[in-house]
Structure formats: structure tokens, C-alpha cells
Amino acid sequence: MNKIKLLIADDHRIFREGIQALLVKEAGIEIVAEASSADEIYNILESKEIDLVLMDIDLDGSSGIEATRKITMANNNIAVLALSMHSDHSYIMKMLDAGAKGYILKNTGKDEMIAAIKAVYNGASYFSSDVSQKLISQLVNKKRSNSSDIPLTRRETEILRLIAREYSNSEIADELFISIRTVDTHKRNLLEKLGLKNTAGLVKYAIQNGLLND
Amino acid sequence: MKEGKFLKSEPKDFLLSVIGSSPYGIIALDYQGKIIMVNSLAMQYLGIEDEINSIADRSVYGYIQFLPELESILRSSLEKQQKSFDLELIPYNDNFFSFRGRLTHHGMIITIEDVTRLKEMETAVLNSMIEGQELERRRLAKEMHDGVGPLLSTIKMNIQKIESDIVELSPPIKEDFSAAYSLIDTVADEIRYISHHLLPKVIEDFGLSAGLESLCKRLDNTSKLEVYFYSSHPEERFDQMIELGLYRSGQELINNAVKHSDAKRIEVQLIKHADSLVLSIEDDGKGFDWKMLPGSGIGLANVETRVASLGGTCSIDTRIGQGVNVVMEIPLNSEKYE
């Protein structure tokens, strides 16, 4: 069986050496090169044959996300596995969007790291359990927010209802015990959120959405 | 005496010249709100373009409809014959004004002061103070996240290597290794937690919307509370100080709601307008009475200071049983305080 040719991209030399030490005896994996910046990665890819890039998100003076995008756009046969400190969903989503096939965290143990490398090399996806949890909650949330276009907050609904009943700003302020300026801000927020131009539009929206009925 | 004579013979002219050259805008009204007298500075501040002599006897309300707070307080003062009112730092026509009303025998006299310069200076001082603080926090966060973090990961890998180099491993020693790994993981989590609090890296990398969204999601997933987040421009980046300032203010207010409000739902919204950015935080909790606030009012004061340092305004509306509604608005044409 061919060995998996690996490139380690991380801005910390000591961390790259740690991975080297960890994987050096691993039969199926050969560490071909190391890089600390995106430019170094591109140079290596031009001269050496690489199967898989183990990619950190923080590189010297550049982002691993951009590097991932560039690599996967240009080469179908090079897989990228993200190895990062960041467990926030923004990083995970951007990295997957850029073309990474897997995402593991830096606290991952040796066995999981090897399993992830092999899975991604074989065309599958691999995520640490923390990461898949984030991905699932992201999916669930997406569904929830799709069901009702742009939901209005409790206060916004109250204000919209009063606008439709022809209350002036100061009457709304008195009714809800808030300042006139707050009413005005809520009104402008509503216009921006709903893409409407003026109070007449708000009234129309309130009527169309049955806010006057209850 | 020359002055005495002058005052005696031309009292009205003398008064008019004093009022005319006063460094404040001055308007005198009767109880119905009709203008008895006005100086040119008041007209300039309010943006009145009519001839100065032609506006006598007209109702002042026709000229202040774009200043709803002034209109409202003036109406109620004249109606209830309240002795005085003070309205500080009201934004109008790209400037900030303070309005003071005092009851007279005939009605009310209002003075208008342009406090834009004062406000700008205050903003600049606050801004540089907070900026210094943020820079220091950033340095610390970076050192922990980029320095200590990777070292810990490396230590863990080194130990893993040692473990795999040992040919035969007795079960108790294997357990010792696992214990060491989980300790390292705990320290790494701790470091990440501290550095995240010092400077949420997600804000630096992806902006305010992503930062707030991640904060809201974390709470939504880990507590019984429902935390809703909406951003009108999720990808847009803003000035770094605005992003950090609003994030920290939002964080403070959301924490308050979680800790003290007994709310079931918190609603956080970031909405960009043509020339301003609005962050609002609403909860459906028990609300509070300003007079009953204990020391924890400090958190709210911090929020107000931060918003002021960005040249913005902050209004906190609450009442027992009615939740808390905070709206912060930051101007986006930032040349003014830079």
C-alpha cells in the first residue's frame, strides 16, 4: 500500500515537530514537508507530490481558510484536513466552505488524528466529536430560523400593532413606558428589517400579517 | 450714570441686545407655546430659516417637530406648570445640544447650548482610555492563545510519543498517562476560556455579527433560556473599536439578563442603518426599578461609558414586570471623534 504523503501547515515550529515525532513511526503515513505560511505551502505543492495537507487556521501572516480554498480549487487530488484550536462554528463552517474534508481539534489524541488522516485520504469526511456537535446544532438552528422569515421581537410586534392603530410615537412611548427615542429606533429597525420605506408600509404589513386581529 | 440711563430709556433694546449677543440660543414662550422672543443663535441651532421678526407669535411646536423629546417635555412642562426641565446631549442635525427650560411669569424661557465640542472631547478621552485597555487585553489574549496553547498541544503529543515508544505498558501506567492527558486538556480549555474572554478571536476574524451569534448560540444551547439573534448585515465588518465595544456591551447586558432577569427569552438584534449601527437587547424577565438597583448598576454604567466612547447613545427602558429593553446606537460616520 502506498504511504499517505502528508504536508503539515502550522505557524508554530514546535507544534510541527510534535506532530512529526508523533507520526514518524506510523507505517501508512509519510511526512513529506512542513510549512508555516500559505506561500510556503504553494511552493511545496509545486515541487512535491502531496496527498493530504494537515492545515492550521492561523498561519504566518495569512489564513489557513484562504489557503484551503486555493488548494482545493486548483487540485482535486489534494485533500485538506483542518487541525485547529478553534471550536467555534464560524471557523468550522468557513473551513468546510473553503473545501476542507475534515476538521479536528488540536487536543485530539494520536489515534484519532491517524484515523482522521486515513478517512480524509480515502475520500471520506472526519470530524472530532466537539466539531460534529457544533455542525449538528448549526443545522438544527438553520431549520428553526427558516420556518418564519424574519421574526419580529416581542417589543417590535407591540410597536407595530400600535402604529397600525395610528398611535403617534409619543403615545406609543407612553403606552409601553419607553422613551420616544427608543420608539423611533424600533420603528427604523422595523423598516430596515422588513425592507419597507415608511409608516404606511408598516401599517400595511401589520394588517397583512393579522397583527390587528388579536 | 450712562448705563442706568440707557436701561431706563431703552429697556427693550437693551434686553434684546443682551439676548442677541448671548452665547446661548434663547427662546421665550408664553403658556400656549407661542414665541414671544427668540435670538438668532436659537434659530440657527434649530435650523429655522424664516425671517426673525416673522416668527414672533407663532407656535414653537411647528419648529421642533424633529425634536420629539423636547416637544414632549415642553408640552407637559407648560401644561403642568413645572418649574424647569433639563434635556442633555440631544443629537440633532449632526450636533449635540442641551436644552434647559425655566418657568417665568409669562410662560417659559428655553436656552439651547451646542455641546458638540464637549461631547467630542469626552468621547475622545473615553475612546483612548478604552482603546488602551483593549490593546493590552489583545496582547495578553494573543500570548495565551498563540503562545501557551500550542505549547500545551505539543507537550501532549510528546507524552503520547513517549507512551507509544514504551513497548510494554502495565495498566496502572497506562492510567497515569490518561490522567496526564486529561490534565493537559483541562489546562488548554482553561487557557482558551481566559483568552476568549480577553479577546474573542472570532470577532477579529469574522466580525461583530459572528461574535454575537456565537455568544447567543452558546447560551441557547447550554441554558434553558431561548436566545434569539438577528443581524441585518451578517457579513459586514465595522471599525474595530465599534465591534469590540458593542460586543462587550452586548455581553454585559446578556449576562445581566441571564443572571438577574428570570427571563425565558432574550432577543438580540444588530441592525445597520444608513449612517448608524443599532444593537438592541430585549428580555421578557422581571425588569427592575432604577432606585432599587444595588451595586450591580456598575455593569450598566460600563455599558454607557463604552457606548459614549464610541460617540453613541444608549437607552435602557425597564419597569417592574416588563422586562428590560436596551437600545444602543453608534454613528458610523466616524471622522468626528477620530
Image (cartoon, grey):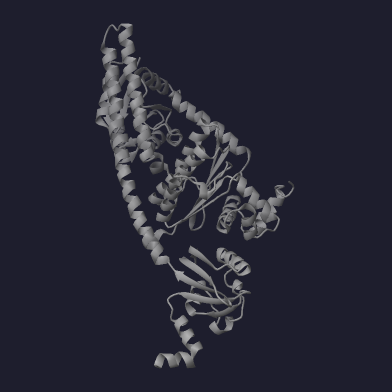
- Quadrant containing the N terminus of chain B in the rendered view: bottom left
A171, above or below A113, in the image = below
Residue shown at the point (25%, 25%) measured from the top left? A17
Q: Which of B265 and B234 is in front in this view?
A: B265
- Quadrant containing the C terminus of chain B in the rendered view: bottom left
The quadrant in which residue A48 appears is top left
B49, above or below B167, in the image = below
Horizontal side, residue B231 vs residue A70: left or right: right
Residue A202 horizontal/vertical position (percent): 65, 54
Q: Nearer the viewer, residue A96 or B27?
A: B27
The quadrant in which residue A149 appears is top right
Question: How many badges with numbers are in the image?
Answer: 0
Residue B235 horizontal/vertical position (percent): 47, 45
Residue shown at the point (42%, 55%) measured from the top left? B308
Q: Nearer the viewer, residue B170 or A1?
A: B170
Horizontal side, residue B334 vs residue A37: left or right: right
Residue A61 horizontal/vertical position (percent): 30, 41
Residue B183 horizontal/vertical position (percent): 33, 21
Residue shown at the point (29%, 27%) measured from the top left? B152
Q: Is residue B112 visible?
A: yes
Q: Is residue A125 visible?
A: no
B336, above or below B207, in the image = below
